[in-house]
Image (tube, rainbow, N blue to C red):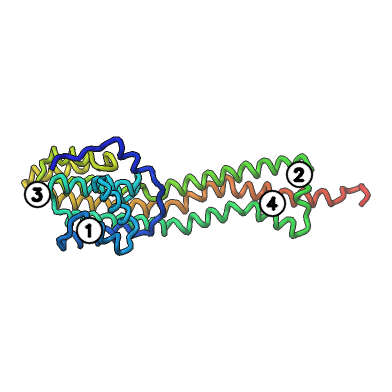
Amino acid sequence: MGEPSHPVGRGRLMKKARTSRPAGAVEATVLRLAVLLQAGATPHAAWRHLASAGDAVAGRIADRAAAGVPLPEAIEAEGDADDAWLDIAAAWEVAATVGAPLADCLRSVAAALRDAQEARDDVRIALAEPAGTARLMTWLPLAGLLLGGALGFDVLGVLFAQPVGIACLVAGAALLLVARGWTRRLVRAAQPLPGMPGMHAELTAIALSGGASIERAEHLVAQAPGGPRAGGGETASVLALSREAGVPGVELLRAAAAHERHASRTEGRLRAAKLGSRLLLPLGACTLPAFLCLGVAPMLLGVLAATPLPGMPG
């Protein structure tokens, strides 16, 4: 089979409404597909069987394939730049091009997707507590306003009527906005990175398992759906080790991909652990001063306004 083309019309397939799918749904679909293929079903028949079993994604892919769209493009239309379906489409296209066992390739990619999803889940769980605490602390200055009003102080009158109070209001609001933006940036930076670590090595292993040369494997991976993937340098070093040691590179590449996923999980946990201490920066530099400006200062000004000066009539 010749190398697949990438027509311009492929981009139109990508522009469709997407609904969120539960974590693990992609891996479950791919594993069922691998079982059907290993049992002897043709690729088109396997997708139709999944569709008849109620898999909505498989139904859309089967409909596109029935309309004459090549299966890699039909699968790619379910994904975007960060979606697992792009990796499935890439693995399918590379395996079909080199003649690698499609069922085994899909099992390998499904396992990789599962590992990557578990790593993202670990990071999200680790981030939940510090991120929630950060969001709660941004409401501290507003809680100060409510507290002052509950204690009987005319904090709103001070903030909106007195020059010093207006200055406190402007400074507190500005600090609060800075704190919220700063916190969001810190939380966003600690989020899991998009894409699946080690996918470049996985796709190269698929191409080599079908008998492709290293040069052709690199070309196929570069042209696969989803565009060039990170990790080419690591893949090249593994292939150099394979040539020097005279051992097959497929298992070395899959081991390298597993190591990349493990390293990504560890880095994600470290980012989540560091987030708790980094969130102290916007808390101390912005949130607490905003609380002083919006909560404490109006109460003090209210007390001073209500207290007659010595020698003045009460």
Q: Which residue in the structure is indicated by mark 2?
A: 160
Q: Which amino acid type is marked by label 4?
A: Gly
Element marked by disc 2: helix
- Residue 56 appears at what percent x and percent y? 34, 58
- Residue 23 shows up from this direction: yes
Q: Residues within 10 Å of mark 2 (few under 14, many from 20)?
A: some
Q: How many marks?
A: 4
- Please identify, in this view, whether the residue under mark 3 or under mark 1 is nearer the observer: 1
Q: Residues within 10 Å of mark 3 (few under 14, many from 20)?
A: some
**Pointer 2 with pointer 3, Cβ within 8 A:** no
Q: Quadrant of residue 107?
A: bottom left
- Residue 32 appears at what percent x and percent y? 25, 62
Q: Which label's residue is closer to the chain start, 4 or 3?
A: 3
Q: Quadrant of residue 217?
A: top left
Element marked by disc 3: loop
Q: Which residue in the structure is indicated by mark 4?
A: 295
Q: Which residue in the structure is indicated by mark 1?
A: 46
Cα separation between marks 2 and 1? 69 Å
Element marked by disc 4: helix
Compare residues 179 and 71 and report the one nearer the observer: 71
Q: Which label's residue is closer to the chain start, 4 or 2?
A: 2
Cα separation between marks 2 and 3? 75 Å
- Please identify, in this view, whether the residue under mark 2 or under mark 1 is nearer the observer: 1
- Residue 16 appears at what percent x and percent y? 39, 46
Q: Which residue in the structure is indicated by mark 3?
A: 248
- Residue 118 shows up from this direction: no
